[in-house]
Image: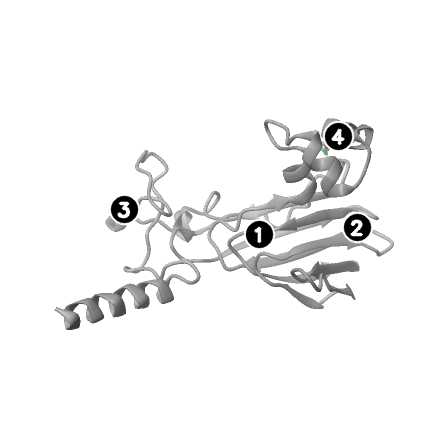
Amino acid sequence: MANHIWVLSLIALSCIMSIASEPSPLQDFCIADPTSSTQVNGLVCLDPKLAQANQFSLSGLHIAGNTSNRFGSSITPATVGQIAGLNTLGLSMVRIDYAPSGIIPPHTHPRASEILTVLEGALEVGFVTSNPMNQLISKILQKGDVFVFPVGLVHFQRNVGHGSAVSISALNSQNPGVITVSNAVFGSNPSMSADILTKAFQVDKSVVDYLQTIF
Ligand SMILES: *[C@@H]1O[C@H](CO)[C@@H](O)[C@H](O)[C@H]1NC(C)=O
């Protein structure tokens, strides 16, 4: 009986260890079935005999995004939402365009680390470590430079060059997720109580009200 429990614990432990990141595929691939309403961790697989190249493919990452918005940036994703064949593979990509002085505001990816390279222009990039250090690790990147944002940490990018800038990132999730700090804190739906936000940020309620209208 004791042996039995020991073996079960080992099995449980090895399962936990193998899903510290995204679970490893149990078959060659699992093309997401966009029509299935079944809820699983990931997406339901199509019949692999029906696989087609276009389920592993996407076009248009050479096309600049429209950066005419308040942040001066545009994100073109290549995640499982665009490439069904990425389902279960723990991998995705994103193109980002930046107008002069454009930013990607402080945000985090709950499910992925990110490795970014600059294709055009120059970017200031950085991330902040956990409490209590909250150390800012930051650098100016030129064309061809690479930078890593560790999973879960708040990070940002800013175009510090003279013209527009372009970067490509790879992320180790089929669906990295994005939590933009300002949207999460001041733009939640329904709104977080102003009592919490005035204390948390040590500002007047008028400041909180203003930020809640913006985000
Ligand atoms: C870019 O976006 C702005 C704001 O949404 C819009 O007015 C403009 O027409 C867009 N430009 C192009 C080339 O699509």
Q: Is residue 72 visible to us here?
A: no
Mark with earlier residue (1, 4): 1
| Residue plotted at (27% across, 46% down) | 50
> Could you tell me if residue 13 is visible in this image?
yes
- Residue 185 lies in quadrant: top right
Q: Quadrant of residue 206?
A: top right
Residue at the (20%, 70%) spot, across then down: 7
Instruction: Give the mark, 2 or 4, whose residue is nearer the N terminus.
Output: 2
Q: CA distance from mark 1 to mark 4?
A: 22 Å
Q: Is residue 99 above or below residue 113?
A: above
Report the disc number at residue 50: 3
Residue 204 percent across, percent down from the top left: 82, 33
- Sequence-wise first label, 3 or 4: 3
Which residue in the protein does label 2 denote?
164
Tag of residue 62: none
Q: Secondary structure at mark 3?
A: helix
Which circle, 1 or 3, is nearer the viewer?
A: 1
Q: Residues within 10 Å of mark 2 (few under 14, many from 20)?
A: some
Amino acid carrying label 2: it is: Ser
Whether tag 1 and tag 3 are in contact, CB under 8 A, the answer is no
Name the residue tied to disc 1: 109
Q: How far apart, in angstroms, are the residues tagged by discs 1 and 3?
A: 32 Å
For disc 3, does the CB lie below 8 Å from ligand 1? no
What amino acid is found at the position of numbered circle 3 in the picture? Leu
Q: Nearer the viewer, residue 144 or 115?
A: 115
Q: Residue at x 37, y 59 (%)?
A: 23
In front: mark 1 or mark 2? Answer: 1
